[in-house]
Image (cartoon, rainbow, N blue to C red):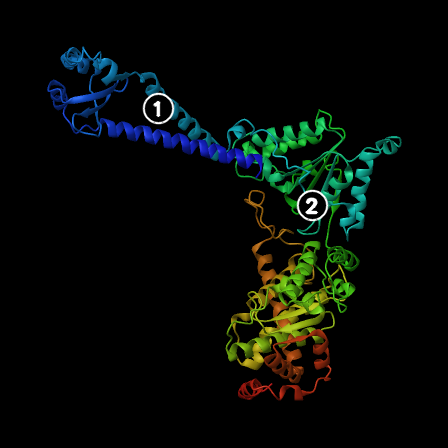
Amino acid sequence: MTPKKSKGIFTYLMLIIAAVFLLIYVSSRLNSTSNKTQYSEIISLFDNYQVSSYELDLGTGELTYRIEDQEKDKHYTVPNVNIFLEDTKDYRKEYNEYHAEENKTLEQDFIKITDRTWLYSLIPVILTILLGVAILYFMMKQSGGGSKYTSFGKANLKSSASARKATFKDVAGADEEKQELVEIVDYLKNPKKYTDLGAKVPKGVLLLGPPGTGKTLLARAVAGEAGCPFFPISGSDFVEMFVGVGASRVRDLFEQAKKHAPAIIFIDEIDAVGRHRGAGLGGGHDEREQTLNQLLVEMDGFTGNESVIVIAATNRRDILDPALLRPGRFDRQIVVGYPDVKGREEILQVHAKNKPLGPDVNIKTIARTTQGFTGADLENVLNEAALLAARNNRLAITEADIEEATMKVIAGPEKKSRIVTEHDKLVTAYHEAGHAVAAYNLKTQDKVHQVTIIQRGMAAGLTVTRPDNDDMHVSRNQMRESIVMLLGGRVAEELFIDDICTGASNDIERATATARNMVTRYGFSKKIGTVVYGSDNDEVFLGKDYGHTRNYSEAVAAQIDEEVRAIIEQAYSECTELIKAHSDKMHFLAKYLLKYEKIDGDDFEKLMRGEIPESVLYESEVIDTASKTHEENTEI
């Protein structure tokens, strides 16, 4: 048990004890004051000499007496002690005279008068004070802590000692990005090497890139390699409900860093505090703006800021204030993008270091088939594969585990337990067959990696394509054929099921978005021209885009809609002709999916080349249903 926990338990224990004592005291007082006997009856007992002994507390007036021929004491609270002593004066005088010869006076032997006034008056006061202090202490702790009221302006720094350690050896797939930071670490260790050449260290380094690409990992590696104080903090830690707290915390952060210079400050998710000024709806008194102003001053203002380097990470560069991005503040901006095939292989080797891999697992193959995956995605793939291997009581991770883990990361786990009707299976089989056959016969489209009619996530089925390379440029013909492939499911439904359903809604949405981008962003429309219409950022930044007006007329908007529709209709017509020309492959693939529920890329290639005989389908009971449905539909 830690000392902090022990102190908390002790405090609770003392609070309980004080409350119990106070409760006992109050209870005893209530019991003692609830007199059932009248005062006159008590005095009558004394007047008749029926009391053999008694004890009187002068402070509380509590009377304990015993009647002759009785063994138990009785209790009574005297209303007024002085009046009681006066009323029993004759009793005590006559009793003393009666026992004079025995030298046995009532005051000596029978009357025991005690005075505990000070003790009884102090106990409730002490208990009440202790209880009040304890309640006040816990109220302050629950509302933010007593110490926090005086430390609002202090930076909420995280201990770099307790952070997960990392070095540049743990960073893979980002060689150029890593080199930029290695140079900064080297400057902190050997400043003379650079100052002799008149070089100055960058005051700030901004790590840009999509989520999961390793920005925070790079910062942790800098902390592990620098050998100097490292002050990590999150951008949201500056923001409070109280005005001026964020700016005060920025000042405190830089003051602490300057005291320990050379030092590194790392601000994670800086977009929480570095947003474009004037973008809020609250005017210039916005708390975030005050915090940002202070950050700008600390990084490059009148005061010196030597030997303190600021590293920040964000995936929203578009909303950062321009003053924050200028040279002198964030001099160096490092884009940490998606890793290429070589980078993915290096990342997989790092994460597979402590995982036993089976002989059929090839890291290069995994890297080639995971285009578009970030470092976090690849780590998740290997972790999910390890969990699947453990679930199946295997001692090593197999290729099947890797494949299933990859599909799980892309679309979620398979829902094999869900009951699906034969009609839904039939629709899904022809829908996915339409996508797959279209992708196979379109030259610019990626190869089909897997086709399945088992539900994953929100999708009733899935056609997964994988690229052969990491091409960065997308041509007009490639985008046009991607729309054709997306419409393959809807075309197959219309041709082979003689009806259409809602399953193609996402395909139509993606096809429409692609067509609209071709017209408005990439200048692929001859009728509209090589002009960009609208914003190049699809995300709305409230405040910055507040009151933003469309930069083209209604007539141009109508032309854009016509061009988008023309592209979709042309792609639909082309897809229809393609599917009709390969209707035999469509039926074969749909029947195969109805029987086996999925087909991998190699078997799909064989099926399309006619290397898989139709005899593999003869044992399926579902084939008759599919054939019968086809015969009832319109002939192709």
Report if the CB atoms under discs 1 and 2 are less than 8 Å apart: no
Q: Which residue is disc 1 drawn over? A: 124
Give, as a three-letter code, the residue at label 1.
Pro
Q: Looking at this view, is 353 or 410 the one in front?
A: 353
Residue at the far front in the pictured view: 101
Q: Looking at this view, is 624 or 357 the one in front?
A: 357
- Rounded to the nearest angstrom, the CA distance separating label 1 from label 2 is 58 Å
Picture quadrant of residue 478? bottom right
Image coordinates for residue 297, horizontal then vertical, percent: 67, 29
Q: Looking at this view, is 274 or 64 the one in front?
A: 64
Q: Secondary structure at mark 1?
A: helix
Give whichever of discs 1 and 2 has the lower sequence position: 1
Image coordinates for residue 443, horizontal then vertical, percent: 74, 72
Picture quadrant of residue 508? bottom right
Residue 313 is marked as none
Q: Looking at this view, is 512 or 323 the one in front?
A: 323
The quadrant in which the C terminus is found is: bottom right
Residue 216 is marked as 2
Name the side, left or right, on which 328 lies relative to 573: right
585 lies above or below 134: below
Near mark 2 (Cα within 10 A), the count class, few <14, some 14-19 or many ≥20, is many
Q: Secondary structure at mark 2?
A: helix
Q: Residue at the location (56% across, 42% down)?
A: 543
The quadrant in which the N terminus is found is: top right
Mark 1 or mark 2, whichever is nearer to me: 1
Picture quadrant of residue 495? bottom right
Q: Residue at the location (64% across, 54% down)?
A: 533
Q: Does the rendering let one see residue 598?
A: yes
Image coordinates for residue 303, horizontal then vertical, percent: 71, 24
Give, as a three-letter code, the residue at label 2.
Thr
Name the side, left or right, on which 127 lies relative to 633: left
Name the side, left or right, on which 329 lies relative to 129: right
